[in-house]
Amino acid sequence: MTSPLSLLNDKRVRDWIYQIALVVFLVALAVFFVRNASENMVKAGIASGFGFLWRTSGIEVPFVLTGYTQADNILGLFWVGVANTMLVSVIAVVLSTLLGFVIGVARLSSHWLLSAIAGAYIEFVRNIPLLFFVLFWYFGVIAALPQPRQSLSVFGVAFLNNRGLTIPLPDGLESLRVAGLLILACLVGYIAFALWGRRRQERTGRHAPTLRVGLVLLVAVPLLALTWAVLATRWDVPALRGFNYRGGFVVIPEFVALLAALVTYTAGFIAEIVRGGIQSVSHGQTEAGAALGLRPGQILRLVTIPQALRVMIPPMTNQYLNVLKNSSFGAAIAYPDLVSLFMGSALNNTGQAIEIIAMTLAVYLVIGLAVSALMNWYNARIALVTR
Amino acid sequence: MSAPATSSVSLWRERLLGTPFTAFVTVVLALAIAWVAVPLIRWALIDATFRGTTRADCTAGGACWVFIRARFGQFMYGFYPADQRWRPDLAGIAFVLGIASVVLAPQRLKLSLGLAMLIILPLLGIWLIGGGFGLRPVETRDWGGLMLTLFISIYASLIAIPLGILFALGRQSELRIVRLVSVIFIEFWRGVPIIAVIFLASLLLPLIMPGGIDIDRLARAVIGLGLVIAAYMAEAVRGGLQALPKGQREAATALGLTYWKATGLIVLPQALRISLPAMTNEFIALIKNTTLVLVVSILDLLGIAQASLADPNWVGMNMEAYAFSGAIYWLICFGLSRWSRSLEKRRRL
């Protein structure tokens, strides 16, 4: 004989009641919001659905990589935004990693002054809003650059002025494509060689000259190939005609400012990660390596870096995803990224708030989830196996 | 040669000039510092103008700090009516006194006093700054400057901290659906750019409310920021919850405490103490991200600095405005991060 009330004394039953109550509450909330939204949209005369994506956009974009024109549809505009966001994020990730590594290693330097300067940079950058850097680079630095006629020349091929950075554009892509394929082949060859070398070492104990082969395949050959390709290609070098530069490709000042802000800001955070990673490898590890008879280079390569990387990878992934998200700060200076083009211009023109917001957020979420999944897989592969 | 560095002079000589290579690096770096610092100091101090009232007084060629003096009230309060500025000041003082009274109160009163302050202070702040009930109403459109930066940061964290704790507990819960809901909430808000969330809040909140209910522009931004920071706070709290030995909750349960009693009396007091540095760091991030309300034309400190550049009477004051606002942000964030670091050190000891 169990009365219905005594069922409540069963923890499992209670747990289920709580969870069902939560689900009912969330569903009710969602229904409430959706009903209000559809009523408000009917009142405002907005049709829901994704049909608007095939309408002509009519929005002019100053910085296009995809061949989009004003006459294309709004979906085309969406891809312009995605491409611009990806472009600035990828370049910012590469440059801020390089700068961050330099600053992080400088912070650990035994030279007191060098370490102090790196520390001052880190403390300066980390305690100031990123938007400050974006506005500062755009309105403070780029706007203060000289007119096109007094441009700052970078080796006479690229020119920096207050209308942006003018860079040379290749006339034909054949030689560059050949060089790219060659570099790719070298990369594949190197990976194959490294795998073979490691397997042979595990089997026979014989060392493979992986480092030397790597230097040839990953540094020397690509450098030669690139030099040849750059020389073999005809370049459209910008030249001053009248008041501005003609020819070449103009990187708009918004891009330059946003990139500079992202790199200077993120480098401060990456430097701290690098410092933490290197410091996390205890001195005993290095000494043990030396006691085993490893050379300093081998200690660095086989003992220090693998262990430091293990500590550095999760926070680095976070920083890279932050760069992707922070690239939307370009909206404040009208860099045509996904948020400012799609959530800004396209939304203003069409009024399709819900669809546009959902698509924009989905891009960030999908990329974020993909990168996290990749990093988790890599992290699991190199994680310490404790028995 | 390698005499032990006894006096500080020889210590510094060893540090900076120890080997020829060290000395070389020192010289190069010193030259680089001089190259940057000398023009900077000349601009900011030696050639700068401090006295005067208009742009015409700035003739020395350096920084025109007159601009900051003339605009100081705006940088602090935005377009808040000048004769009413005692109200945000009073709210700030009440806030500090309220927190001090909780910190200094005897142990047995702390909890009830703290909860009372948690309800009284925010309402008092909104009343004092916003007006009504006997005070002249000031529309949120006129709020601005540093006051608004602090207002948004504090009120957004009033949303973020309770929600964050709730979702952190949810993520650790045994109930599968609760866990799933918490994970989705946290990962969703952490995965999207804050600037998009501020756009989203200002566009969607009016849309999903019943017709006729109008949410204030500033409130939308605060809610949007609060939701995102809640997700980050949840991760900060999770760190503390995970660092706490499992035995604590098990012991509490064995003593017969219910889930909420065990959580409120045993787990959270210890876990929050562990996560306080991480939560402070999230608060610093919140202060920095508050600047993004600029995109929905709410003018916080950085927004006011940016807007002041458009004044035709003060053309070309970019550097002065950025230097002043940047310095304030830096002082606040640096101070907080030092505090959080000292908290962490104290815990480790």
Image (cartoon, rainbow, N blue to C red):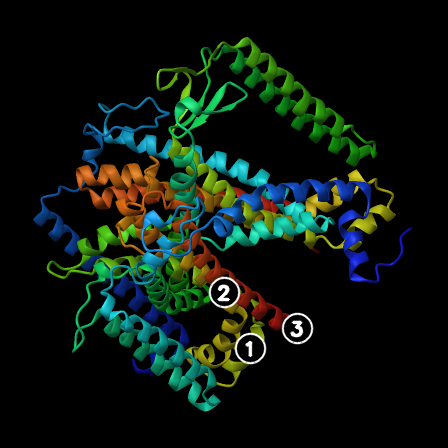
Residue B226 in the image: above or below residue B307: below
Task: Give me the residue at 37% from left, 46% from top.
Answer: B317
Q: Nearer the viewer, residue A88 or A333?
A: A333
Counting residues from the N terminus, which is met first, the one under dot 3 or under dot 2? 2
Mark 3 neighbour class, 10 Å CA radius: few under 14, some 14 to 19, many 20 or more: few
For mark 1, does the 10 Å Cα neighbourhood hold few (<14), some (14 to 19), or many (20 or more) residues? some
Q: Position of residue B159 (x, y in %)?
A: 34, 66
Residue type at mark 3: give it.
Answer: Leu
Q: Are marks 3 and 1 in contact (CB under 8 Å)?
A: no
What subunit carries mark 3? B
Task: Name the image quarter holding the C terminus of chain B.
Answer: bottom right
From the image, state whether disc 1 or disc 2 is nearer to you: 2
Q: CA distance from mark 3 to mark 2?
A: 20 Å
Task: Name the foreground residue: A367 vs B100.
Answer: B100
Residue A365 visible in the current orientation:
no
Q: Determine which residue is flagged by label 3.
A: B349
The residue to which callout 1 is attached is B248
The disc placed on residue B33 is none
- Looking at the image, which residue sits at the far right? B1
Is the residue A79 above or below the residue B286 in the image? above
**Residue under circle 2?**
B336
